[in-house]
Amino acid sequence: MWDEKHLFPNADFYSATAYHYNGLSTPLSTPILVMSRITGGTTHVIEERAAGKLIRSTGDYVGSAPAEWVPIEKRCLTALKRQFTSKYCCPSHSSE
């Protein structure tokens, strides 16, 4: 999308792809987008009225610190080792 229009794709770009691969008719993509935006916007207004003030995002990232890059072939065990044994995590890595 950047190469063609110099825009970063938003969530709608990926939602349309998901709708398509789930067999949803293309003409329904826009109405579903509108319904989700109306729902989100309405919720935002309800929250603002309950708080008695305007709520605006600062856009500051408050998530976790950057993580170390892990090669794809080691990601399954790295990410899930705490929860599962390698036998249940990745059959291709069960010998580790």
Image: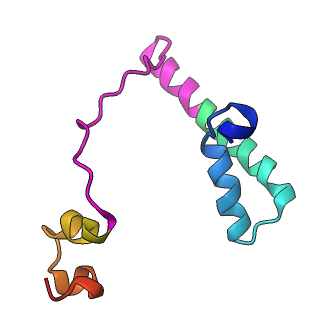
The magenta stretch spans residue 47: yes
Comparing 90 with 83, the one in front is 90
Q: Quadrant of the C terminus?
A: bottom left
Residue 66 appears at what percent x and percent y? 26, 38
Residue 22 appears at what percent x and percent y? 68, 70
Residue found 25% across the figure and 79% down from its top: 89
Instruction: Tell me where the magenta segment starts and ends, as one range.
Output: 43-72
Image vertical order of residue 76 relative to residue 52, above or below: below
Location of residue 94 by image quarter: bottom left
Q: Would you say the magenta stretch is mainly helix, strand or loop?
A: loop
Q: Quadrant of the N terminus?
A: top right
Q: How is the image coloured?
A: rainbow
Comparing 81 with 42, the one in front is 81
Q: Is residue 82 left or right of residue 27?
A: left
The magenta stretch spans residue 19: no
Residue 2 appears at what percent x and percent y? 66, 37
Q: Is residue 90 left or right of residue 11?
A: left
Residue sitting farthest toward the top: 53
Image vertical order of residue 71 relative to residue 47, above or below: below
Q: Is residue 52 left or right of residue 33?
A: left
Residue found 65% across the figure and 62% down from its top: 18
Residue 45 appears at what percent x and percent y? 57, 24
- In this rendering, the count of numbered labels is 0
Residue found 76% across the figure and 66% down from its top: 24
Residue found 17% across the figure and 76% down from its top: 84
Comparing 53 with 66, the one in front is 66
Comparing 52 with 26, the one in front is 26
Image vertical order of residue 84 relative to residue 43, above or below: below
